[in-house]
Amino acid sequence: MPIQIVRNDITKMKCDAIVNAANRTLLGGGGVDGAIHRAAGRELLEECRKLGGCKTGEAKITKAYRLPCKYVIHTVGPIWHGGHHHEEEQLISCYRNSLRLAEQHHCETVAFPLISAGAYGYPKEQALQTAVSEICRFLMHHDLTVYIVVFDKDCFQISKRLLHDITEYIDECYVEAHHGENSVRMDAYLFENARMRGQGQPRQRSLSLAEAMAGIDESFSQMLMRKIDEKGMTDAQCYKKANIDRKLFSKIRSNPNYKPSKTTAIAFAVALELSLEETNDMLMKAGFALSHSNVFDIMIEYFIKNGVYDIFTINEALFEFDQVLLGQ
């Protein structure tokens, strides 16, 4: 998957490169910087001494030594001074230059911390939005898997208003689901009574198996390809917007009977900006349905009903509620 949000220690990430939120000297410090230097060993410090430091917004690359990756990309994030001293432009430059270095060194996977969101004081929510936005912009034209690594869940907070709205919606849906249990039982009772009363009436002819099979509906894969064409999207635009790996998309396209996971099916529904009815239809093709019996489904329904189709906004909320992420 192009972007994955993971809760981990970045020094434990097994990927081609990890990004170090360094200071201008590149000689180690506190936080992520110090942790990476300690885990890599003194050899990393010796190589960094030869680089002559690094300016804010720029990036330099070294070997990883004792870390479980090939490279360490060092970038210097901006110190927050209220947002009026080009902090955002400098932070964007950090991600852009780091990603370019990763590509130049043929990396297929790279892990980022939230740059500047620690001791440098950059507001965490804004730091995350900038990170996701710039990484997505890069991935629209490059094949790379990027991890955003957060060590502490407190470093990853969605807006309080969104959190409140989602919580309210979940509570309402749970009440409806619980209140509706008796209605479901009553509907079943009425249906059974009606069936019993109609036993004396002539029965309709049953369909043969061959007749039933002849009326089979389109598959998930077929519906997905049709919707992509109807929306005027390219394949790449769709799977990148869905945060789905190109190889997985190729499997789905080449196999009309491919059965995706529920999160993959929903990711495509979000990328295509389908209505709730269309989303349920697409899920049914894959053998799934949305239900008010679990938080994940209620949250997906909430975002679709409110016209929120940014998959990373949705994943931020899912992460906050300890739910599985879309495309993951």
Image (cartoon, grey):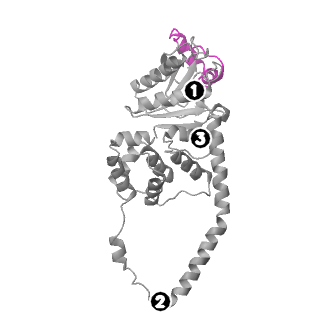
Badge 3 amino acid? Ala
The disc, 3 or 1, on the residue closer to the chain's N-terminal end is 1
Residue that numbered label 3 is attached to: 317
**Chief secondary structure of the magenta span?**
helix
Above-or-below relation of 4 to 173: above
Residue type, mark 1 in image: Gln
Q: Quadrant of residue 197?
A: bottom right
Residue under the image location 63 percent in, 72 percent down: 185
Disc 3 packing (10 Å; few <14; some 14–19; many ≥20): many
Residue nearer the viewer, 245 or 192: 192
Of badges 2 and 1, the one in the foreground is 2
| Position of 53 relative to 246 (above/below) | above
The number of discs equals 3
Q: Nearer the viewer, residue 89 or 249?
A: 89
The residue that disc 2 covers is: 201
* Corner quadrant of residue 6: top right
Going 49% across and 23% down the picture, which residue do you hit?
A: 95
Residue under the point 61% across and 69% down: 184
Which mark is first along the chain, 1 or 2? 1
Q: What residue type is disc 2 on?
A: Gln
Q: Which mark is residue 126?
A: 1
